[in-house]
Image (cartoon, helix red, strand yellow):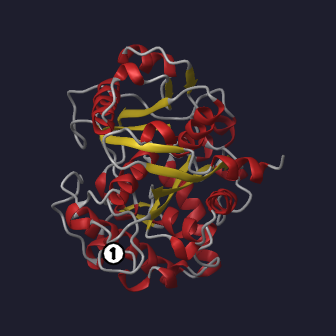
Amino acid sequence: MPVESSLARISGKASIVGVAESDEIGKVPNKSPLQHHAEAARNALEDAGLKLSDVDGFLTAGYNGYDVAEYLGIQPRYTDSTSVGGSSFVIHLAHALAAINAGYCEVALITHGQAGRSDRARPGPNPGLPAAQYESPHGIMGPPITYALACNRYLHQYGEDRTRQAMAEIAVSTRKWANLNPKAYMQAEKMTFDDYHDSRWIAWPFHLLDCCLVTDAGAAIVVTSASRARDTKKNPIRILGVGEGHDHSMISQMPDLTSAFGRNTGPQAMKMAGVGHGDFDLTMIYDSFTYTVLVTLENLGFCKPGEAADFVAGQRTAPGGNFPLNTSGGGLSYTHPGMYGIFLIVEAVRQLRNECGDRQVADCRLALVHGTGGSLSSTGTTVLGRA
C-alpha cells in the first residue's frame, strides 16, 4: 500500500486530550529539568482528566526515556526517545498517532523539561561528531552562527533591506502576541521597530531581537485513541496530518541554505489532512530566529521563495492581522528552554479549544504546527483540528 494511503487511513484516529506547561517557566533556578518534566506531566494529565496509571506510552527527547519514566514512576509498554532537536516533539505526535493505531499503546504521554537558562553545563558539539572537526575550529558553533550563515545567503539572494524589514516585522508582531500572554517571559516589555534595529549585534545579520529566548521550562501533551478521547475532560483535538524528516546535520552540508526540509513535511501533512494553505485559522512556526520563520513560510508554500518579506509586511502576522502566527509570543518572547517544539503544540491546542483569552483567534478550527531542529536540519509538521 502506498505511504500516502496508509497515512490517510489513520488521519484523525488519535487526539490530543491534555496539554500543559510546568508550574513555573522563565527563570527558575531552583528546579531541575526532571522537575519540569514531572510538573508538566501532572498538569497535562489533570487537563485531560486522566491519571498517571492510565499512561502506557511514553515519548520524550533530550533525556533517555527510561530516565524520565523512572522519575515519573511509569512503566510504559511503548517508548520513544527520538531526539532531532526542537522538532522532536512535533514528530512525537506522528509517532504517538501511529503507535496508538498499531495497538502499541492507548494513552501516550509526551514530556519535555529543560533548564536552558539556569543550567551550568558547557555547550558545544560532541567531540566524536564531524562538526567538532570540520566546523568548530573555524568558529562555526552554536545556533546563532549557523543560522546566521543561512540567513546571509538569503539576504544575498533576495535583498538585504527588504529582508531586514521582514525580520523586524516578525520580531515586533511576535512581541505583540506575547504582551497578551500572561505566561510570556517578555510579556511586560513592548517592542518598537526602532528597538529592533537598535538592539545589539549577536552574529551578523542577527540583532539580539532576532534571537529566541533562553529559559527554564517544561511542557507535556497527552494523546489517546479517538474512542477514548470522547470520555476525556475537554474537547479533543484531532491529529489530522503529519510529516517528518531531515536532510543534514552540519550547516555546511545543508543542500540549500534557503530551503529546509519543511518543503517535504508541509505538503505531506497537508495532503494527509486533505487541506490547503487557505484553510488554516492559525499557524504555529518554530521561531528560533526571525529568519527561521521567514524561510519556513516559503518552504511550507504559503508564499514563493523570496516573497516572505511581502507576505509578512504591515504587521500581517500580529494581533488584528489576517494571518495569526505564533500567538503565544513564540520562542522569541514567550519561552525557549533549548528545544521549543512542544510549546507550539500547547498553544495550538489551547487556541483550538478557545482557551486563550485576550489573544484568542476567533473561531479557530484548524491549525498548522511546524517544528525545526538542529541547524535547520530536521522538521516536523502536523495539522490539528477540532473534533
Corner quadrant of residue 187: bottom left
Q: Residue at x 20, y 66 (%)?
A: 358
Q: Which corner quadrant of the image does residue 277 belong to?
A: bottom right
| Left or right placement of residue 293 versus residue 45 in this view | right
Q: In the orientation shown, which residue stands out farthest toward the left?
A: 188
Left or right placement of residue 262 versus residue 174 in this view: right
Q: Position of residue 384 (x, y in %)?
A: 49, 56
The percent position of residue 275, horizontal first and vertical second, equals: 60, 67
Q: Going 38% across and 38% down the picture, which residue do you hit? A: 231
Hey, which quadrant is residue 216 in on the image?
top left
Classify 9 as above or below 40: below
Residue drawn where x is 63% and y is 61% of the image: 266
Residue nearest the observer in this picture, 9 or 246? 9
Give the residue displayed 45% in from the left and 55% down from the top.
387
Q: Is residue 246 visible?
A: no
Between residue 129 and residue 25, name the one nearer to us. Answer: 25
- Total numbered badges shown on the rendered structure: 1
Q: Which amino acid is tagged 1? A: Ala
In the image, residue 138 sits, relative to residue 351, either above or below, namely above
Please state the horizontal and vertical placement of residue 363, each as a whole percent of the image: 35, 70
Q: Residue furthest right?
A: 1
Residue 43 is at least partly visible in this image: yes
Which secondary structure lies at badge 1?
A: loop
Q: Residue 282: image x %, image y %? A: 43, 67
Judge whether 336 appears above or below 71 on screen: below
Residue that mark 1 sits on: 318
